[in-house]
Image: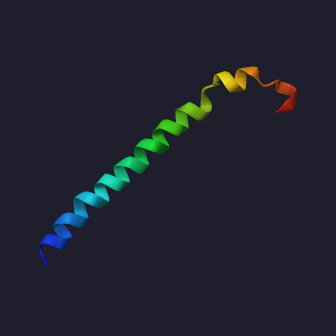
């Protein structure tokens, strides 16, 4: 029974860390203009 909570804690933290990393990466990346955005005409936006 003790093994279950011990396993769940690190797994939960690992999943949360991965999700946080993706959100943090996508945040600034979406703000920064990419090559695709540079090629798209502003009128289309």
Residue 10 horizontal/vertical position (percent): 23, 58
Q: Residue at x 35, y 55 (%)?
A: 15
Q: Residue at x 13, y 71 (%)?
A: 3
* Number of numbered discs on residues: 0
Corner quadrant of residue 38: top right
Which quarter of the rendered picture does the N terminus lie within?
Answer: bottom left
Answer above or below: position of 7 versus 37: below
Residue 39 horizontal/vertical position (percent): 75, 21
Q: Is residue 19 left or right of residue 10?
A: right
Q: Residue at x 48, y 36 (%)?
A: 25
Q: Is residue 21 left or right of residue 30?
A: left
Q: Is residue 12 left or right of residue 4?
A: right
Q: Residue at x 35, y 49 (%)?
A: 17
Residue 19 horizontal/vertical position (percent): 42, 50
Corner quadrant of residue 31: top right
Q: Residue furthest left?
A: 2
Residue 40 horizontal/vertical position (percent): 78, 25
């Amino acid at each position: 029974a003790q093994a279950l909570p011990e396993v769940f804690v690190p797994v939960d933290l690992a999943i949360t860390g991965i999700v946080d990393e993706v959100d943090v990466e996508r945040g600034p990346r979406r703000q920064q203009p990419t090559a695709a955005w540079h090629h798209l005409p502003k009128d289309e936006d």
